[in-house]
Image (tube, rainbow, N blue to C red):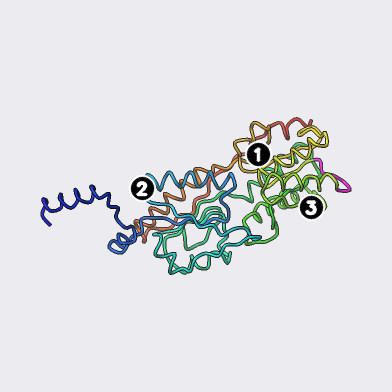
Amino acid sequence: MSAETREHVLEVAHRLEYVGSPAAAALSTGKAGSVGIITPYVDRWSFGRMLGGIERELRAANVDLLLYCTGDPSDPHPLLPHKRLARRADGFLILSVAAESPDLEEIFKLRMPLTMIGASAPWTSSVRIDDRDAAATAIGHLVERGHQRIGLIYGREKANPIVLEHQRYLGFSDAMERAGLELDDSIQAPGGFTVAGGEEAMVRLLDAEQAPTAVFAFSDEMAFGALQAMRRRGLRPGYDIAIVGFDGHDMSGLLDLSTVSQPLELIGATAARNLLADMNDPSRERKAVVLPTELVPRGSTVRDQ
């Protein structure tokens, strides 16, 4: 095609406001120009922060983002068949879904570039924190403050090894056993990773025959609910009962909540960069990245002495 003809075609296309078909472009280039994100949730603060880091990296690379929500165990949403998924994306990011989960069966059939966030598998890149060690650090902090009866607010399935919160439960159990402390089921309750669920769980712990002197919540949002339950009963965080959360939520500082902070935006951004690199060079050695967490002590635990 001559330069003159090309210029004329572009001029006509502009005048007619023609928009090229992404599907047709994918057929000609073999590239969809997009990355699929598999996530069980879209309405949690921590997932939103990770998605923010992912979106910035993909936007900078001029790659589109496609979101697929599998839903939680109470409301599952099956993924599309793997052949349909393959036509829509050049690679996938998997947020907080264990490699053993049946939700990922269709994804693993693709044999496409994958990066897992929060979990790992030997055949793919991954970015995560050490949930087990981070949870043990939180319990160690409470033990150092003199607490011996420590309650737990978990999400839904603390003992299920294919659910990622299980690693936090193992860390909780490790630290309790090292300190010679009892694992008492009467002061452990599910909070569903929501504020309302955290409040309901804390009520159960407070109503136990022997209430805990300290509580560890698997998320800051559940800890916020626990704080509300305490205040409704006139209990003072850090004086009457200590509490520590997990995530490093923006609101944790305002509520003076001790927390285990994780670098959520960095986790998302690092995973996106690794996936883009794997897509550009499929023979590249897969990377397993473990990012650090930080215990942030605040008034909800340090005022109790």
Q: Are marks 3 and 1 in contact (CB under 8 Å)?
A: no
Residue 156 percent location from the top left of the image: 69, 55
- Tell me which amino acid carries mark 1: Thr
Left or right: 183, with 6 as reference point = right
Rounded to the nearest whole Å, what is the CA distance between mark 2 and mark 1? 34 Å
**Residue holding disc 1:** 259
Number of marks in the rendered image = 3
The residue positioned 40% from the left and 48% from the top of the image is 58
Residue 62 percent location from the top left of the image: 35, 48
- Tell me which amino acid carries mark 2: Ala
- Tell me which amino acid carries mark 3: Leu
**Residue holding disc 2:** 61
**Residue holding disc 3:** 183
Left or right: 46, with 179 as reference point = left
Residue 226 lies in the magenta-colored region: no
In the picture shown, does residue 147 fall above or below 164? above
The residue range painted magenta reads 208-213
Mark closest to the chain's N terminus, 2 or 3: 2
Q: Main secondary structure of the magenta part?
A: loop
Rounded to the nearest whole Å, what is the CA distance between mark 3 and mark 1? 21 Å
